[in-house]
Amino acid sequence: MRSVCHSLSLLTLLAAQISGTYAFFAPFALSSSSSPKRNIKTNQVDTVPISHTRDESASTQNLINFLCQWKSEGIGEGAGTEIGFDANGFRGLYATKPFKKGEIICKIPSDCALALADPSAVTEETLSVVDGAVNFLQWYTMNPSAREMWSSYLDTLPTRELNFDPTPDFWSDEEINQLEFPMIVKQAMERKEQLAEIAAKTNLPFDELQFATWLVASRSFAIKITVDDAGLVRDGAVSTREQGLRVLLPYLDMINHSSDNCNSELHLIDPEKDEAWFAIRAQRPIKKNKEITISYGAAGVETSVGLLMNYGFIQDENKFDTLLLKRGGDDCIASLDGWSTTLEDDEQQLAAGVPGNMGSVLRFRAKMKRSYPSEE
């Protein structure tokens, strides 16, 4: 059985075991705790009406207590943020006080991050979300001591009955083919095949691996660490490589996505130190009671293909879809003429109320069709 805790603060110890050194390369902002503070203007009106209901469940309170024991900041009553539900019952993170642009909203220490790959296993390949799901099951949920240690976090994760938006991993092949867009059809089919292969190889129940893959895809954050192999090669040579690593970040993974109007970003403080911090930083002034949002994906860039594939939803507005279609390629549909239905056809079916996975199919097709660049 693997180590119970693969927290990021162990990176330096793991690196010493293979005579290498690690540094973080993250698709989000980095800073030092000693960075100079900015002089920032305050909001003139710093409050908006409350639009959410505070989550007062025992599981959420247990998570907050656990993180506060690890000296997390900005978390808990009166600290600056709270978990709540909007009018549609969707869970998210809300500001309980105003924040200035550039201000840290909340942060958790790297000790509280759950790594989904072994940082000491030097490899040039980034493990897939299915591989991460295997590690999640074997390292955390199926290991009794690890399950007990991380129970305050694991108990807050979505279930099939609550806070679950099915990705194409859960669809039939026919439903996937109805998406038509080659990029997502190929990705969805390949993941389904990989799920079946790895479930058979590891003897993990398919349903458990499938749902764990959804958890990893929808809730983990991808970072990269650079590996310095200078001690492993001849004198005078320089050898470095990048290694991908996925991590689960308790509490921070409650934050919802906004493609075009996010107000915050994930931020890594003091990555070169053992006491590193994962933080949420305001990208612009945020008023009290406002929902805190980030942009998902590498470097905060995620098209509707990635959102549906990894998170199970599509947003009405997403500027990155137009950029994807402008780029084109064999994995795209070049023009509206390449689809089997018109935008009007899809919108009429949506208006009629198509439920389930086919509703997601229609929303995706309509969103992509609305995103084609206008002819000048």
Image (cartoon, grey):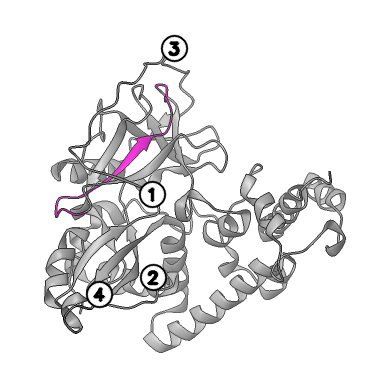
Indicate the secondary structure of the residue bearing disc 1: loop
Q: Determine the CA span between mark 3 and mark 1.
A: 29 Å
Which mark sits nearer the N-terminus, 2 or 1? 1
Q: Determine the CA span between mark 4 and mark 2.
A: 34 Å
Marks 4 and 2 close (CB-CB < 8 Å): no
Which mark sits nearer the N-terminus, 3 or 1? 1
Q: Position of residue 44 (x, y in %)?
A: 42, 11
Q: Tell me the quadrant of the picture where the C terminus can be found.
A: top right
Amino acid type at image mark 1: Phe
Which span is picked out in magenta? 272-288
Q: Which mark is residue 238?
A: 4
Marks 2 and 1 close (CB-CB < 8 Å): no
Indicate the secondary structure of the residue bearing disc 4: loop
Q: Which sits in the foreground, 115 or 150?
A: 115
* Circle 2 residue: 133
Q: Residue furthest front?
A: 236
* Circle 3 residue: 45
Q: Tell me the quadrant of the picture where the N terminus can be found.
A: bottom left
Amino acid type at image mark 4: Val
Q: Residue furthest bottom?
A: 201
Indicate the secondary structure of the residue bearing disc 3: loop
- Vertical relation: 198 (above or below) 188: below
Q: Magenta region's main secondary structure?
A: loop
Q: Which sits in the foreground, 11 or 258?
A: 11
* The magenta stretch spans residue 145: no
Residue 4 location, quadrant: bottom left
Left or right of 124 in this view: 181: right
Q: Which mark is residue 117?
A: none
Q: Which mark is residue 28?
A: 1
